[in-house]
Image (spheres, rainbow, N blue to C red):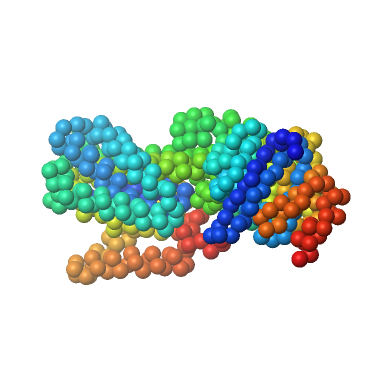
Amino acid sequence: MEYLLHIAILIGIYTIAATSLNLVAGYTGLISISHAAFAGVGAYVTALMGLKLNLLFWFSLPCAMAVAAVLALVASIPALRVHDDYFVLATFALQVIATSIMTNWVDFTGGPLGLPGIPQPSIFGAILSTHWRMLVLVWLLAGLFLFLTYRLVHSPFGRVLKAIREDEVLVRAFGRNVFWFKVSAFVMGAACVAVSGSLYAVYITFIDPSSFTVMESIFILAVIIVGGAGTLWGPVIGATALVALPELLRFVGLPSAVAANVRQVLYGLLLVAMMFWRPRGLIGEFQFRSDYKS
Amino acid sequence: MGSGVLQVEHLVKTFDGVWAVDGVSLAVAPKRITAIIGPNGAGKTTLFNLITGFLTPDVGMISFNGYNITGLPPHRIARLGLARTFQDLRLIHRITVLENVLLARPSPSSETWYGALFTRWKRRESREIEIAKNWLQFVGLADKASGEAGALSYGQQKLLAFACSLASEASFLLLDEPVAGVEPATVERLVDYIGQMPNIGKTVIFIEHNLDVVEHLADWIVVMDEGKVVAEGKWDTVSRDAKVLEAYLA
């Protein structure tokens, strides 16, 4: 039972991460591979505030969001000056810098050894076991972010984001400052993914830089590609598929050394297959592989 | 030349040594229809891109309603009331026809993440939808409002792009080949609509190769060739000008 709860919690955490990237990449068309870096910011802020200042999760969570938002704002001003492939490269650079800070600023982040013993949030404390408590918390927040995304993308603001994804020249001709719309989306995405990082930190109670590398960023991107970028439920479906499917491999009876590698191979195959046969994802609307526009 | 709403002075734009626009000066009178004609590569679209801020001139000045708009970014120029359409017909294909027109409406201050999440934008939006539908009605696309813009025929997409420039409430429309590639029945409709613009207080400047349309619509014609204005005047004068005939026949 605890194992199933564990999977459900992880799916919830990845749903939040993918929902936030969906706003940036799926709806606005900004393919960012620095999302794990902002999850890491959230995780480290929450962990450090809990460990060193003994602050409650409910206080450190908004702080984590704020710190991630400010860093995203600072980073996006140069990064969003460039377009398309160059933007992907800029976010990659951002990710590399973030990983390197997490690894090397040993006094603050614990370096490669990470931060153990992160206090868990004390809500519904007396009533629920740790796993149930986390499950409710994670999915409440996932539901909240899905609702906020729904509200955003069905508003006039969201209409502009979707238009930018298709033709930003036209949006400029319509009198919109495209740059600031992109910055808004990127900053919101960072603040939201910081929450998934925070949840991860307080759930596992241990973090180290290996959880927030570029591979993790690409995994989050894979989640929305598989699920369907630019749809509300795509991230939920993608997170379920990519978190749960490899777990099924455990029961096939492969030796564990082989299983880990098979999992990586499966991810790769799945991504390639999706790009060929369902570039819009399982339920997708927007495809990254554009074959209709000059 | 008197003072126009749009004043272009000695505009120069070069690309790698090619003088795409080479010292163009223009004054566009308000509530008139001005046509820009000339062979391909004459610099007509480059001139539009300079006026609307998509390109920055190397030399020269552009003023609109007395403001110097030289070097302003496109969205600022659009907000001052200069709307444009594109030769390569730009629309957002994957949203509805109505949503395209809504996008073209002036940007409200509530169009931010904060406004989307924490303000009641719905009432304002329903008013916007009314206005947008009226413009779709005007160009005869009301029945297509809820369909995807990408599903429209080419002629209908041109009508939609025109409706968008109207919905922007700009006082000044720059139309880049509004009837090119459109079937004759739709050309007639577009000509009719554009002809009505001065009556509703709008100034039009358009690029067009279809000289019948130019003769029919334009109060003033500017002829460009190799980046320069080689002639301008009313149709009767321009159509007899030796340099114009040369530019077109050469």
- Residue A83 in the image: state x and y as whole percent: 44, 53
Q: Does residue B208 appear to the left or right of A54 in the view shown? A: right
B92 w.r.t. B78: above or below: below
Quadrant hosting residue A93: bottom left
Q: Does residue B76 appear to the left or right of A250 in the view shown? A: right
Q: Nearer the viewer, residue A276 or B51?
A: B51
B113 w.r.t. A272: above or below: above
Q: Tell me if residue A58 can be seen.
A: yes
Please count the marks in the image.
0
Residue at image position (63%, 37%) is B63
Residue at image position (66%, 33%) is B65
- Residue A71 in the image: state x and y as whole percent: 31, 41
Residue at image position (69%, 48%) is B175
Q: Nearer the viewer, residue B161 or A50?
A: B161
Residue at image position (39%, 41%) is A188
Q: Nearer the viewer, residue A287 or A205?
A: A287
Q: Tell me if residue B194 can be seen.
A: no
Quadrant where the image shows the C terminus of chain A:
bottom right
- Residue A48 in the image: state x and y as whole percent: 18, 38
- Residue A89 in the image: state x and y as whole percent: 36, 56
